[in-house]
Each structure stands twice: as C-alpha cells, then as structure tokens.
Amino acid sequence: MKARLILSDATQFEGLSLGAMGTNIGEVVFNTAMMGYQEILTDPSYHFQLVTMTYPQIGNYGVNPKDFESRRIYAAGFIIREYSPVVSHWQATKSLDEYLKYYGVVGISDIDTRQLTRHLRDHGARMGMITTSDEPFETLLEQLKKGKQLVGRDIAQEVTTDENYDWPMDEESKHDQQPGFRVAVYDFGIKFSILRALYQHDCELRVFSAHTPADEVLAWNPDGIFLSNGPGDPEPVKYAVKTVQDLLGKKPIFGICLGHQILGLALGGKTKKLKFGHHGANHPVRYLPTGAVEITSQNHGFIVDADSLPPKEVEITHINLNDGTLEGFRHKTLPAFSVQYHPESAPGPRDSRYLFENFIREMKQFNA
C-alpha cells in the first residue's frame, strides 16, 4: 500500500507503507548508523521522532528478544530506502514489518532517503507526518502544522518510569555481584544497556522517576547519582534542574545526553537546538585531557552552549570534531561531570567505557 511522508515546509515524498496503517507525527531526523535499528526504535530518546535510516537496506536481520533498549518502540515512525522482507539471523523472532505493526508504528519505505537527508541538512530538522491516508495534501499539511511541536515541550515526563524500581528486576538476570556502590539512576528515558553497563561495574541500582525530589533519593543513601539520557528539549524539564542543583556537592554526579544538558542548566549554562542534530554511531569526539579521539554513538537535537558555562567553575573536557560543539565537561571543585554522547554504546567499540570507571573512582574518593 502507498504511504506519504509530508514535512512541515510542504515537502512531500511518496513510497510504500511499512508497519502499521494510519498517521503518525513527529520531528524528522536522520541516523547514519549502518545497523542497530532495533535499538534505535526502542530508545526512549527517539520518542516523538520520525527516524530516517541513511543506510539503504534495513530489516535483513529481523528483530530478536535480546537487543531491546526498553519494553516497547518509542520512535514515532520509521523511514527507510529499501525494506528486506527476508530475515536472516539465528536469534530473530519477528520481521521488522511485524514488529512495527505489533506496536502500531507507521513507517514508509521506497523513498529517496539521500534526498531527504540532504534536505534536512540544508534546511534543518522539520516536523513531519507519515500517513497511509488518502486525504488531500492540503488537509494533511494543515493537520501537521496544528499538531504538537517539539521545542518547549517536556517530553521526558512522557517516558520516565511511573514507579521507582531496583535493577535487575528479575533474579535470573542477577550475577554474583561483588559489594559495590549504590547508584541512584534518574530516569529521563533510560536505556537497558546503560543499566547493564552500570551493573557490570558492580553498582547496586535503583531507578527513580524524573520527578523524584532530591531528599527522597538521598534518603536511600546512594553513593552516586546518574542522570540518564532522554528525549526532547531540556529547558522545560525545570523540576529536574532544580533537583540536580539540590544534589550538587552532596553526592558524585554523572550525566549523559539529556542528563548532561540538565547538569549544564543546573550549573547556570544555557542550551540551544542544533540545525539537524547528531544521530548516529560514528561521531568523533576529542577527550581534551589526553587528546584521544573516541568514536561515539549519539542521539540528540539540543546541546549545552559552551560559552554559557561559568569558566571559573567548569572545565570543558570533550569536543565534537565534526562541528566543534560541546560534548563533555566537569566541575572544577565538585564531583560532577557529564558527556553528551552514549558511553555504554560500542561503535569504538570500548572507547568511552572509561567514563564509568571515572564515576566509580569519583564515588571511591568521595566516600574515602
């Protein structure tokens, strides 16, 4: 069946329907990774986004039960050049098309994703709509323009946990863990792989809702605070900024992605929206203290403005080598640091795992 992708600037692409029938609206972005579509779809940071894969053929290894980043698909829609109906992987239990249908996610294939990517690079990310509706173009465009927008909207509260919980949640997933540090994880859109990485460093984890006040977290007596990734604009997440300000200096803090932006706001910085964001598994980042270059996995449309951070209090530690934007900083006197990218991912493959070791060291020193 035919499907259409309509952008808010009236650009239109026609292709074939993939996944569920219907209409989904979101911000159209592109991801340059060659694989990992299952992880991308289930990453809560992609909530309210229509994800374009720049790699041409998608779906050839299907979907398996082990590579989820959450319990469902969070991406609002999926855009690809060519769908592979043939699934070839020993762990696969569903095809990509079946998986999208199961969660009611609308997709589109057989469009020129190179042209779409160039359009987004030249003109910036746009709100868009994937639809199988045969309504007139003008009617759909008007519906798109009247729909929800990304900027100025708190999306983190739409993906955070409703109830606090310990990780792992089932006894079968637990290993013979050595006594380690208790880490309170603020869930702004946490990925399973981040929790696994912390747990593999022998951390005892409790995941807290984004709205949890500082005193409730401190009552659990954690050794450190982790601020997770998450979707959308950081500016409206003011409750989390206030919470981090209340926690600064009381416990070591490590933030990534949205957590990095929230920490930056808590320290008096400002954030701004990128033209088309960083979405992919091949972004080079320089670690300034050593000069080493890391190949990183990224997914964000907003950044902390480096010039807005107080230079007497904050040291810049990481810079994106593609566009020079801020990728990491640390406080000069308080045990608090963060990075914009995802250190648990492995495009390097282990280039950024030292950040978890740095967090462990911060907790050891703080508790010494």
Image (cartoon, grey):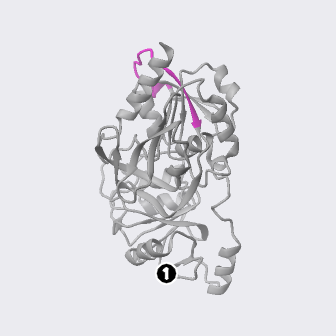
Viewer can see residue 136: no
Q: Is residue 213 above or below residue 326?
A: above
Identify which residue, 35 or 27, lies in the foreground. Answer: 27
Corner quadrant of residue 316 = top left
Q: Please say whether residue 252 is visible from this viewpoint.
A: yes
Residue 274 in the image: state x and y as whole percent: 51, 61
Residue drawn where x is 44% and y is 28% of the image: 359
- Whole-percent x, y for residue 348 in the image: 29, 46
Residue 117: x percent and y percent? 42, 72
Magenta span of residues:
171-186
Q: Is residue 324 magenta?
A: no
Left or right of 116, for residue 84: left
Label 1: element kind: strand
Residue at 33% from the left image edge and 69% from the top image edge: 56
Residue 122's place in the image compared with 180, above or below, is below
- The amino acid type of the residue labelled 1 equals Phe
Outermost front residue: 312
In the image: residue 265, left or right of residue 255:
right
Q: Which residue is mark 1?
A: 13
In this rendering, the answer to whether 142 lies above or below 304 is below
Dividing the picture into quadrants, the one containing residue 35 is bottom left
Q: What residue occupies the far top of the structure in this picture?
A: 368
Q: Was residue 185 drawn as part of the magenta stretch in this picture?
A: yes
